[in-house]
Image (cartoon, rainbow, N blue to C red):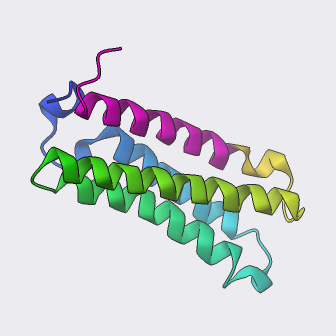
């Protein structure tokens, strides 16, 4: 059991899930600024990817074994990289300046570090 999990009653108690929920809020705010022509492109992709990160974390926590939990955390990490790519496309297409997407990227980076730590902890890595 990880130190974080010692007091965990629910996936909602996981700090990484809470931070992923913050990321969802930030991504929704960001996508509200995108042109309507991106409704089925970047807007949909960003919102879905952000939602999947938190959802995979919750799903993994609800699994009955560590291997399945790790698999879901891996999926969350993959969705996070997809999300980061979508947000960087917003910058490359000049839809928004970097100053308006930095918070999303910062939260994404923080969630990524937390996912890595949780994954290593679950694997019993002592670094």
Residue 65 shows in this picture: yes
Q: Nearer the viewer, residue 120 or 31?
A: 120
Q: Residue 21: where, in percent of width, then height?
A: 43, 53
Q: Is residue 81 left or right of residue 126?
A: right
Q: Residue 96: where, in percent of width, then height?
A: 84, 59
Residue 93, magenta (yes or no): no
Q: Residue at x 48, y 41 (%)?
A: 111
Residue 11 shows in this picture: no
Per the picture, the main secondary structure of the magenta-coloured stretch is: helix
Residue 4: image quadrant is top left
Q: Residue at x 68, y 57 (%)?
A: 85
Q: Nearer the viewer, residue 116 or 108?
A: 116
Residue positioned most to the right: 94
Q: Residue 41: where, in percent of width, then height?
A: 69, 79
Q: Residue at x 16, y 56 (%)?
A: 62
Q: Residue 37: where, in percent of width, then height?
A: 79, 85
Relative to 126, is 79 above or below?
A: below
Residue positioned most to the top: 127
Q: Quadrant of the C terminus?
A: top left
The magenta span reads 103-127
Residue 43: image quadrant is bottom right
Q: Is residue 26 left or right of residue 72?
A: right
């Amino acid at each position: 059991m990880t130190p974080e999990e010692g007091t965990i009653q629910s996936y909602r108690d996981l700090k990484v899930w809470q931070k992923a929920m913050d990321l969802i809020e930030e991504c929704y705010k960001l996508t509200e600024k995108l042109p309507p022509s991106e409704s089925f492109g970047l807007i949909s992709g960003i919102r879905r990817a952000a939602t999947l990160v938190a959802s995979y974390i919750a799903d993994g926590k609800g699994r009955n074994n560590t291997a399945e939990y790790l698999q879901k955390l891996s999926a969350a990490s993959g969705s996070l990289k997809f999300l980061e790519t979508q947000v960087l496309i917003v910058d490359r297409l000049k839809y928004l300046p970097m100053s308006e997407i930095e918070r999303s990227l910062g939260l994404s980076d923080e969630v990524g570090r937390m996912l890595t730590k949780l994954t290593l902890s679950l694997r019993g890595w002592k670094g």
